[in-house]
Amino acid sequence: MAQFKKNKYLKPFKNWFILILVVFAVWMLFFDTNSWLIHHELNSDIEALENEKKYYKREIEKDKKAIKKLSTEEGMEKFARESYYMKKDDEEIFIIEYEDSLKTKKDD
């Protein structure tokens, strides 16, 4: 106990009010249900969800543009030709593949 009284760093903890204040502060920062750690975690979750919301709003806008393009006859025909290689009865389709687009085997 004599060591406790002589140490200058532990001297403020002799006062009960300061000791209770420190315990209360530690409790509120780390152990309480509304602690700083939980608030930090919840704020990071909110930020991630807001970023996800922005991403989906951009995707919705792209999809709306694609739907608008597909709502016309020319847009629908272009989509069918490019995606499904459809053709009219009197047409022939030639698919040209470039060397970089072909999958090649690599010999080790």
Image (cartoon, rainbow, N blue to C red):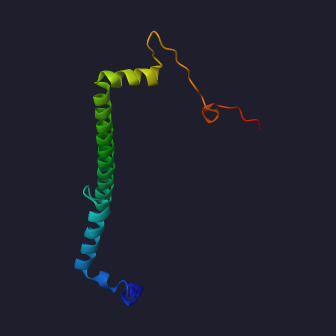
Residue projecting furthest to the right: 108
Relative vertical location of residue 104 with respect to residue 25 in this rendering, above or below: above
Residue projecting furthest to the top: 89
Q: Quadrant of the N terminus?
A: bottom left
Residue in the image at 34% along x and 25% along y: 75
- 77 sits left or right of 19 in the view: right
- 80 sits left or right of 65 in the view: right
Of 103 and 30, nearer the camera is 103
Relative vertical location of residue 18 with respect to residue 40 in this rendering, above or below: below
Q: Position of residue 81 (x, y in %)?
A: 44, 21
Examine the image and state in which quarter residue 10 appears: bottom left
Examine the image and state in which quarter residue 25 appears: bottom left
Q: Quadrant of the C terminus?
A: top right
Q: Position of residue 42 (x, y in %)?
A: 29, 53
* Total number of numbered discs in the rendering: 0
- 43 sits left or right of 3 in the view: left
Residue projecting furthest to the left: 17
Of 79 and 34, nearer the camera is 79
Q: Position of residue 73 (x, y in %)?
A: 31, 21
Q: Position of residue 85 (x, y in %)?
A: 48, 19
Residue in the image at 28% along x and 60% along y: 35
Relative vertical location of residue 88 with respect to residue 51 in this rendering, above or below: above
Of 9 and 86, nearer the camera is 86
Relative vertical location of residue 78 with respect to residue 65 in this rendering, above or below: above
Examine the image and state in which quarter residue 80 appears: top left
Of 9 and 1, nearer the camera is 9
Residue in the image at 31% along x and 52% along y: 47
Residue projecting furthest to the front: 90
